[in-house]
Amino acid sequence: MMPTFRTRAVLAVWAILSASAAGDVSAQAQTQRATPIRVRLPGNLRWMWMDSVATDPVSVAASPAMTYTAASAVLQELKVPLSVNEPQNGVLGNGGFTMVRLLGRERLSKYLSCGTGNSGAYADVRRVTMALFFWLDSTGQAQSTVKVGMLAGAQDLEGVSKNALLCGSTGTLETFLTEEIRKRAVMP
């Protein structure tokens, strides 16, 4: 059994090294942009790449700096603490903040689908841990794009005796956020 394990280990190392050598060009391009963000939330045992769940880019008729300021203001209004605040890379958000029942002034079930039980929508009756990020990019002097990535999981408020649930997005939050950014990022 050991020779088979060693052979597999050698092949795995070789595959990783050859993949990294082939990815040198993309790695150089990545150094100019922010490092990809990955999170692991309750209800999901695997690490998830946030950009894999991001929306398609939405066009905003404002400079990237104004769009970034607007995005930051929207998150602050929703009381989302900023753990990533990188204007130079066009990335802001948080990889794991917790809330119960509300995000801003809206019930979480408006934005998340975590299932339902006897007491109602789980998004409204459980502790929700959410990762929320914006990626902003310039498409011209007074034009930019915004992508929104969101993942969430819900845990029972009484403890860990019940399994955590992975929550899906209803799409409402992403639409709301991009519309709010468009309203606030107005060129003078």
Image (spheres, grey):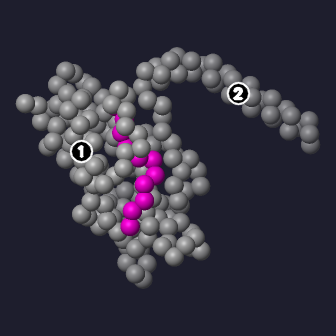
Can you give x and y, in whole percent of width and height, for residue 55 in the image? 34, 43
Q: Residue at x 33, y 31 (%)?
A: 87
Task: Magenta stretch: give its range.
Answer: 90-100
Q: Residue at x 92, y 39 (%)?
A: 2
Can you give x and y, in whole percent of width and height, for residue 142 in the image? 17, 25
Can you give x and y, in whole percent of width and height, for residue 129 in the image? 45, 59
Amino acid, disc 1 = Ala
Label 1 Cα crowd, 10 Å radius (few <14 / some 14-19 / many 20+): some
> Disc 2 or 1, which lies upstream in sequence?
2
| Relative vertical location of residue 9 with respect to residue 81 in this rendering, above or below | above
Mark number for residue 73?
1
Judge whether residue 149 can be spotted in this image: no
**Would you name the residue on which mark 2 appears?**
15
Q: Is residue 55 magenta?
A: no
Q: Nearer the viewer, residue 33 or 24?
A: 33
Circle 2 sits in a helix, a strand or a loop, which is it?
A: helix
Judge whether residue 100 can be spotted in this image: yes
Can you give x and y, in whole percent of width and height, for residue 152 in the image? 44, 57
Amino acid, disc 2 = Ala
